[in-house]
Amino acid sequence: MGQRDDRFHVEVSVGARVVEVRATGEIDVATVGALRSALWAVPARSVLRLDLSGVRVLSAAGVRALAAAHLRLRAGGGELVLVRPDPVVARVLRVTGLHRVVRVIDDAPAPVAGRTLIAA
């Protein structure tokens, strides 16, 4: 699954247990719908690794979408992991306190064999 507009792009890579989502651009009120669609397409029992290294703007609408995805995944036995946030995005995560409830890691995972990339 992939969605693109001029300001935001998302790609989803599906594995057996881990789903990797790579977001690039700006996550704000105008683009959060595409992010939300990608996050909600993931089965709740999955580990969802969201690569934020290409995101330069994370608005309150984006923070709300991440918090809601975290709650949905946790309720289904899954987990949301935020990977390599840009320094500006990392600051938003700290200021909002989201880093206290959602795991944030600074390293990228090794590629996993058997993944299917879905993108537009």
Image: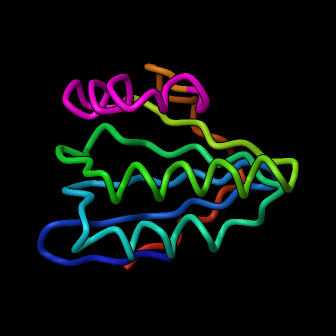
The image position of residue 28, as x and y in percent, is 24, 61
In the image, taking residue 102 as reference, residue 34 lies left or right, namely left
**Which colouring convention does the figure follow?**
rainbow
The image position of residue 88, as x and y in percent, is 19, 30
In the image, taking residue 107 as reference, residue 79 lies left or right, namely right
Q: Please name whichever residue, 93 or 106, is drawn nearer the observer in this view of the structure.
A: 93
In the image, taking residue 108 as reference, residue 58 lies left or right, namely left
Magenta stretch contains residue 105: no
Splitting the image into 4 quarters, where does residue 14 fall? bottom right
Q: Residue furthest left?
A: 6
Question: Would you say the magenta stretch is mainly helix, strand or loop?
Answer: helix
In the image, taking residue 98 as reference, residue 88 lies left or right, namely left
Rendered residue at 27%/76% (across/down): 4
Magenta region = 85-103
The image position of residue 52, as x and y in percent, is 36, 41
Query: Considering only vertical position in the picture, is 33 above or below 107?
Result: below
Query: Considering only vertical position in the picture, is 95 above or below 120?
Result: above
Magenta stretch contains residue 97: yes
Q: Please name whichever residue, 96 or 118, is drawn nearer the observer in this view of the structure.
A: 96
Rendered residue at 27%/24% (across/down): 91
Rendered residue at 42%/75% (across/down): 2
Rendered residue at 45%/54% (across/down): 64
> The C terminus is located in which quarter?
bottom left
